[in-house]
Amino acid sequence: MNSRATRLALLPLAIIAIGAGSGCGSSETGGSGDGKSLTIYSGRDEEYVGPLIERFKQQSPGTEVEVRYGDSAELAATIREEGDQTPAGLFFSQDAGALGALQEAELLKQLPSSILDRVPSAFRSAQGDWVGTSGRVRVLGYDSRALAPSKLPKSVFDLTEPRWKGKVGWAPANASFQSFVTAMRLSEGEAKTKEWLEQMKANGARSYEKNGIIRDAIADGEIEVGLINHYYVLEAIKEGEVNGDSYPVKLHFFPDGDVGTLINVAGVGIPEASKQQKAAEQFASFLLADPQQQYFAEETGEYPLVKGIAQDPSLPPLSSIKQPQLDLSDLSDLQGTQELLQETGVL
Amino acid sequence: MATGVNRLPVAGGFTLRGVSPLTLLAASLVAAVCAVPIVYLFIVILGEPAAAWQAIWRQGTLRLLLRSLALAVAVGFTATLLAVPLAWLTGRSDLPWRRGWTVLSVLPLVIPSYIGAYLFVSAFGPRGELQKLLGVEQLPSIYGFSGAWIVLTLFTFPLVLLPVRAAMRRLDPALEDAAHGMGRSQFEVARTVILPQLTPAIGAGALLVSLYALSDFGAVSILRFESFTQVIYQSYRSSFDRTGAAALAGLLVLVLLLLLTVESRVRRRRSYHRVGPGSARITADVPLGRWRWPAVGFCAAIALISFVLPVGMLIFWSVQSVAGEVDWPQVATAAGNSLLLAGLAAAAAAIAALPVAWLGARAPGRLSRVVDLLTTSGYALPGIVVALAMVFVGIRLVPVLYQSLPMTVLAMVIVCLPLAITATRSAVVQIPPRLEEAARGSGRSPLAVIATVGIPLTRAGMLAGAALVFVAAIKELPVVVLLSPIGFDTLPLVIWQQSSRSFFESGAIPALVLLVVTAPGIWLLVGRQR
């Protein structure tokens, strides 16, 4: 080939490569910010977060708030790629796993104890890098037309019995489900988890894309039970404007700290490189203040994490649910879960 | 490289087999920008080579790769099977209401594959409309390979149809006449004269369709087909494993290389331009005779399942959903943003495609293959990989432009460019090289040659390419989520937000609006044909 032409052609390529490579090393020190602007990366839907943002703006006039909505893990990946240049002042994640991943990559700042101490220690980072703002519980949704409460399994491990063949729905690709499997690996061990997955598969567990679709499949009588988050049923009742008693899907909380009843949280963390620390801390405190905790209980059907906030009367109190022993930050260890799901052919 | 490269003495410098240095430089520049995702993958993989190796060297990677490749090839094949007869009927025959069928045959392109997949599941899935209609207990499962295969074929086949129809209409009837004159049968003529002239168009279209199937995430995840792209998404989403994802994406680039090699074999160096003096006569329509009505039935059946039924369902859901719940100002703003973004991307891609197409048509060789690989990579890689690559490179190289409209447009161009290149290149190969040579020989500057010969003669191809990019860019989601300016809502973003909760139906109205605003692109594609 014409060598001059080749060189000419490769020149721009080289420039890009060198530029990208050298850019990695550059750094910018983030100040504490003037508290006048705040950029939030939100993995939570605008539908739920939007009203809170409006409230926050009213309470802190002068602060300009911008929100980028997306998938929690994708936004965590974005913050990671952005590195020390991230425009994100605060990361509002749908689950603890994405926050745990950023913590592990040492990309989060330590939060002040005035914020951390608002919630029980189980629902915040042990290192103090993130704090939960609302909780959700993994439950077994069941078709109350087909099943009496006495027929319900005592443990998630009972779902492998022949009685449940082809009648269980799950969402192997769903982040909440994978967090639960991770919790099972952490608390029950790899071998037992693998065995459970294999037996569930052999027992004809039916895969769905999302929790909400599992719920609808139960309501449609397609399956009898499904592993979902508790608030999907409250949401259907609210959005469908049906009477809670007549809605066929009911919630079953596995008793005695069974790993099937994992309590996971949505939460916030402040990127290490955040240039808006002051405003970000204000927003985190705001989310943990009583009125906003009340908002989660009433509007999103989630559990408030701050003590003394009234919640939906149809739900058992959070303190009565026994959380399996684990550190929620460890739920970022999804690598092994994914490998296990692939190995067993579940995913 | 083989010796005997034909170096024409040209005013102003050297040439690589008949391509001006300006074209060469422009094409390399475009390729370099398009190389951002691959450069990013390299940086990530080299950062943690052991982890990358581990991610690849896992049980099931090969099987996964073969499954995805099988899907890509199968979709390319069936799309061709649908597209070629349809192209011939709407392009070369006296089919009744031909204009209507011409438009209908392209319209499936406006339906994003994720919406198509959702509609397909709602219609044929468990507890779907069909099951209700038939009153049966269970239907054969539509999930997995077969569902993904059907849906991806239905909503991408126009990518084969368009270039094939264009090629059919440009066929020089003198060739067919000559073959007939030599006593060959109709079938022989089709096999020996027409088909060879169509293979580049078929190859290019089928490649676009196959690569789409390879990189699609929305449809395969709704249809629960575990594809390579889906696993890459999962690596980011649930394992926070950027190295593993990058390693898998690197493998995908190798698959792309393989498919590109196959395609370039098909598009081997041949002459497709007219050699004799004068211009080709307009081709005559072939009378269908008693096949008229079966042909109409064929066109109608395809139009029904690939466009009429899906749109009908969207309309049905829109009517059902309470119009009062729709945030009309938000939808209107999003429609405006979508039009702006897709319009800018289309214009930029049409220009960027010109030198690449010219290089590919005039100097197919090692360099052009490298350029092809780089310019196609953004289209073949999962959207999330391109988006994160742009995040990584963009914030370091051009922080001023980070998460701005220009950068979003640039990312969109990287994702959609092969659509424009393919359309433009098919126009370039039909221009006799003597025209540029004559223009250069008369002492015009390279820029003047481009302005007076290149652009005018490739205008139709550029417009078609721009239209294809417009139609593709307006549906694109991951790039917009991560790279657009904050608050820059587009229609796919609104659809995603509305349907990410469990009720997809609430996204039906913005989805319909999306179909409507895509109309200008379709008009550009087919409206101007006679």
Image (tube, coloured by chain):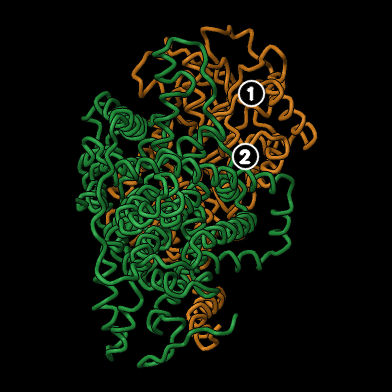
Chain colours: A orange, B green
Q: Is residue A75 visible?
A: no
Q: Are marks 2 and 1 on the same chain?
A: yes
Considering depth in this image, is A140 or A295 the residue closer to the camera? Answer: A140
Measured from the top left, where is residue A335 in percent x and y? 67, 47
Which residue sits furthest right?
Answer: A191
Instruction: Mark 2 vs mark 1: give the one in front.
Output: 1
Q: Is residue B2 above or below residue B171?
A: below
From the viewer's perspective, is B212 left or right of B438? Answer: right
Secondary element at image label 1 = loop
**Chain letter, disc 2 residue:** A
Of the residues under marks 2 and 1, which one precedes in the sequence? 2
The amino acid beneath tag 2 is: Ala
Within 10 Å of the Cα at label 1, are there few (<14), some (14-19), or many (20+) other Cα atoms? many
Residue topped by disc 2: A122
Q: Is residue B8 above or below residue B30?
A: below
Measured from the top left, where is residue B232 in percent x and y? 58, 50
Real-space Cα separation, disc 2 to disc 1, in angstroms: 31 Å
The amino acid beneath tag 1 is: Ala
From the viewer's perspective, is A328 left or right of B361? Answer: right
Residue topped by disc 1: A205
Residue name at image x 55 percent, y 20 percent: A141
Considering depth in this image, is B258 or A273 the residue closer to the camera? Answer: B258
Quarter of the image where the N terminus of chain B is located: bottom right
- Tell me the quarter of the picture where residue B317 sits: top left
Residue name at image x 39 percent, y 29 percent: B503
Q: Is residue A226 above or below residue A4?
A: above
Q: Is residue B244 visible?
A: yes
Secondary element at image label 2 = helix
Considering depth in this image, is B103 or A153 the residue closer to the camera? Answer: B103
Q: Is residue B50 above or below residue A334?
A: below
Q: How many marks?
A: 2
Measured from the top left, where is residue B264 in percent x and y? 52, 62
